[in-house]
Amino acid sequence: MRGRREYKWLAQYYDQFFTFHLPWFEAARNCVLGRILPSVKSACDLACGTGTTAALLAGTGITMYAVDSSSVMCRLTREKAARLGVPLRVRRADMRDFRLPEPVDLILCEFDALNHVPEKADLARVGAAVARSLRPGGYFYFDVNNLLAFEKIWPGTWWMEKPGVALVLHGGFDAERGRGWSRAEWFIQKDDCWKRHHERVEQVAWTETEIRSTLLKAGFDRVRKFDATPFFVGDQGIRPGCRTFYLARRSARAED
Ligand SMILES: C[S@@+](CC[C@H](N)C(=O)[O-])C[C@H]1O[C@@H](n2cnc3c(N)ncnc32)[C@H](O)[C@@H]1O
């Protein structure tokens, strides 16, 4: 997604096509946040998608916010929360300037959502917005696709099919612009007729140095990283360096 462009078909069919990653992300969350979660009273799932993580955490008694810039994603998140009977405060907002009514203990931003911002410079805006929404000593947990993933994994074609809908994903890496891109071609059946829809997603690549220095400037005082490979059991494509999970702590001194 670039600029204001938002997920549409990807949102509508997200829970049908994108569930393969859930066990991997649960493994990463359990490992990285295992010790922190028991003391978390309030949290926000930033770029929440269809709200799977937000609903899961809300079900454990955490006061939970969910933020996404896509209106379809927000609607699906509200519907999921209602279906599961969990309280979830869903807000449509951009991760570069979102605000919460109260500072929370934890902000999560999973499944490389942070790579989705349009410009490299946007990382600083996200860092500032996240820091403002965390209580001093609160945590920011996120994962990113690294350059290696754009170079080695993104170029390729994938075909996925469900009853009445087929998806072809074709991706690549634009080295000059430092961006991974993915074209989604949808084939959706209505009665006897198949309609084709097109969607394009772009992601920005950052180095670890850029991430660390941005977070330190935004008021985080401790940044830990975890390579994703051990969590992604059975993923044939991933290798060390492709994806990193980060845990950053907002400085415990409120004035930082
Ligand atoms: C790959 S999905 C990840 C969704 C979810 N976190 C998950 O784990 O399944 C990326 C999400 O980021 C959202 N997004 C993209 N750019 C955004 C922005 N600038 N502000 C807020 N959300 C954004 C998209 O609408 C989409 O729901």
Image: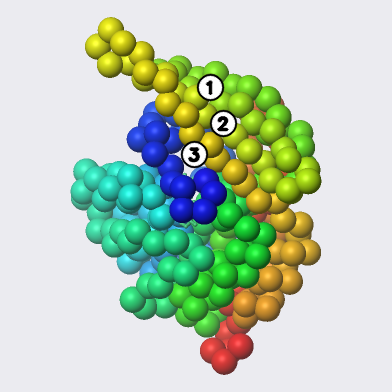
Residue at the (73%, 48%) spot, across then down: 177
Q: Using the image, tell me which numbered label, if any, was put on residue 168.
A: 1
Residue at the (52%, 46%) spot, across then down: 1
In the rendered image, the vertical position of residue 214 relative to residue 158, given as above or below: below
Residue at the (62%, 47%) spot, across then down: 203
Is label 3's Cβ within 8 Å of ligand 1?
A: no
Q: Quadrant of the C terminus?
A: bottom right
Label 3 vs label 2, nearer the camera: 2
Q: Amino acid at mark 1?
A: Val
| Cα gap from disc 1 to disc 2, whole angstroms | 8 Å
Residue 243 visible to an observer of this rendering? no
Which image quadrant for residue 42?
Answer: bottom left
Give the mark nearest the N terminus, 3 or 1. Answer: 3
Q: Where is residue 111 drawn, in percent x and y?
A: 55, 46
Residue 225 visible to an observer of this rendering? yes
Say which residue label 2 marks. Answer: 183
